[in-house]
Image (cartoon, rainbow, N blue to C red):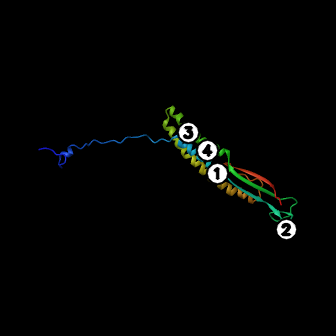
Amino acid sequence: MSLDPGTPGPHRADRVQTAPVMAHAGRKLRPRAWGLALIGVVALLSSPTLTVWSASAEYGGADGDGHWIDGAGTPLSSAPPTVQVEAHTAPAALAVLLLVVVVGVFLPPTLERFGKRSLGDVVRYAAYLAVPVVVVVGVLIYSVWQGHVVMDQIDHEVLRPHGFPWGGVTVTTGHATR
């Protein structure tokens, strides 16, 4: 009796390999420095554009006869004050963001040289998470502060409004002109 490979039968099961085939394990996913550097550059460039705004107010003006008056209509002997506020990102905020990126890029290789590779990965993952958190939380808190506190100060005729420390405020005061 000859076994023809094309004929069905129990002889085919004898030739099937039953040993498990293992897939290649591959490389472990590790956070890379170039990705963090790229995210850091984008964050450093986009953060200042998200926090720029300006507001101005003139606390009075001129009446129908051309005499100076304040916001309540009381006559003044000189021109009423004006305030212009320009908000921008504070250099300290950019320094914190830059520090997070630099630590996330350069500390893990140093830790790896001392046998702490997993700790270096944790530092880099933390930096990957910290960069967007620093930008988003900083912009949100800054926007709420500037939108409520500084604008309220301008509405209440404060001549030197103060801004949130995360963002800088340039205040220019002067007098109204005709």
Does residue 77 appear left or right of residue 21 in this picture? right
Q: Image quadrant of residue 146?
A: bottom right
- Residue 176: x and y in percent read 82, 58
Name the residue that disc number 4 marks: 97
Mark number displayed over residue 49: 1
Name the residue that disc number 3 marks: 105
Q: Image quadrant of residue 61?
A: bottom right
The answer to which of marks 2 and 3 sits earlier in the sequence is 2
CA gap, disc 1 and disc 3: 24 Å
**Above or below: residue 118 compared with residue 140:** above
CA gap, disc 2 and disc 3: 65 Å
**Above or below: residue 81 compared with residue 118:** below
Q: Residue at x 70, y 56 (%)?
A: 149
Task: Name the secondary structure under disc 4.
Answer: helix
Check the picture and name the quadrant holding the N terminus.
top left
Task: Name the secondary structure under disc 2.
Answer: loop
- Residue 136: x and y in percent read 59, 51
- Amino acid type indicated by mark 4: Leu
Task: Name the secondary structure under disc 3.
Answer: helix
